[in-house]
Image: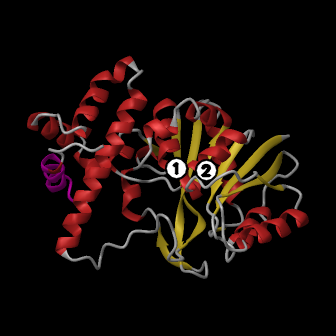
Amino acid sequence: MKQIAVLISTYNGEKYIEDQINSILNQRFDSERYNLKVIVRDDGSTDNTNMVLQKIMIEHKNVKKLPFEKNLGFAKSFMTLLSEVESDYYFFSDQDDIWEPTKIDDFLTVMIDKEKSESICGVFSDAWIADQFAVSTGIKLLEERKRNILDGQLTFIQQIFETYVAGASLFINNNARNKVLEFDYDRFFSHEAHDHFVAIIISKYGTLYFLDKPTLRYRQTGNNVYGARDSKKKSVFKRIITLYSRVKNVQLLMKSGALIISNLPAERDLSETMLNISRGKASVNTRINFFWKYRMYVSVRYPRILAICYTLFTFRGVN
């Protein structure tokens, strides 16, 4: 029987964690072929989260909890879960979402098919943006961004410029997990979320597939570490500041991405270019050529204008 592990990191999630776990335990899938377990690591909650979890674990023997040692932050907490739990397949789950009833089955259908030709494999999906009561707003999390996902696959270079993969919608096999654990998270992505770290490695060393279907309700509580975007109400000044911050984040991603591919002979030129841009050491021509070449990944709406903005804003390096 194949094992499926759902990894959840909690922190002061007493209001929503029981609903989330129930939505996972009530999934419809072939339980004769797959055994489901939910593994939780609490990151030092100061509310009643642990009491709620204790109650759940008494009622459901397939819900387990890792021992708490110290607060790590949500990203490292998830990476600790990934390193300490052994399974055939892994889901990542936020503490406050709600899974649609067929989410596991939908992901397994894609994974089983794709594993026939790809050993390192990941699948991610879209999600409904939901209000604080987990009621869908009818708006999808990816919206226009998914227009750039061609042939149902997400590439390495796309993820240098844009975030597509939310951890709450990510599913990987054990080969993908083992490849991810070959890299030191602290060295590569000290400023980046675990989901981007996992996704970018899979897309380079395996294949990352897109399931074009919302499989969960992404609850907006006001306390989300990373919430859904809402830029429509921003002033022109704030949009410029946001763009500048986004470019700086891209430079951080370039630095990490360059290190991830630096051991691949065919990628050395790309690695060197990205590393120089991230450090602010690339010439104007190098920056122009790079951002113009990948302008469609820089922006779906305004590829030419924003490629120029990226060239201008990367004259300084990042730490």
Q: What is the basis of the colouring in this image? A: secondary structure
Q: Residue under label 2, please give it.
A: 78
Amino acid beneath label 1: Asp
Nearest the camera: 113 or 200? 200
Q: In the rendered view of the protein, which quadrant contains the C terminus?
A: top left
Rendered position, 8 above or below 191: below
SS class, disc 1: helix
Rendered position, 277 above or below 110: above
The answer to whether residue 25 is left or right of residue 242 is right
Amino acid beneath label 2: Phe
Nearest the camera: 319 or 176? 319
Q: Give the number of callouts.
A: 2
The answer to whether residue 284 is left or right of residue 23 is left
Rendered position, 274 above or below 252: above
Range of the magenta residues?
302-312
Residue at the spot x=19%, y=50% of the render? 310
Q: Residue under label 1, please give it.
A: 195
Residue at the spot x=37%, y=17% of the render? 265
Image coordinates of residue 214 in percent, x first then y, are 56, 64
* Residue 50, image quadrant: bottom right
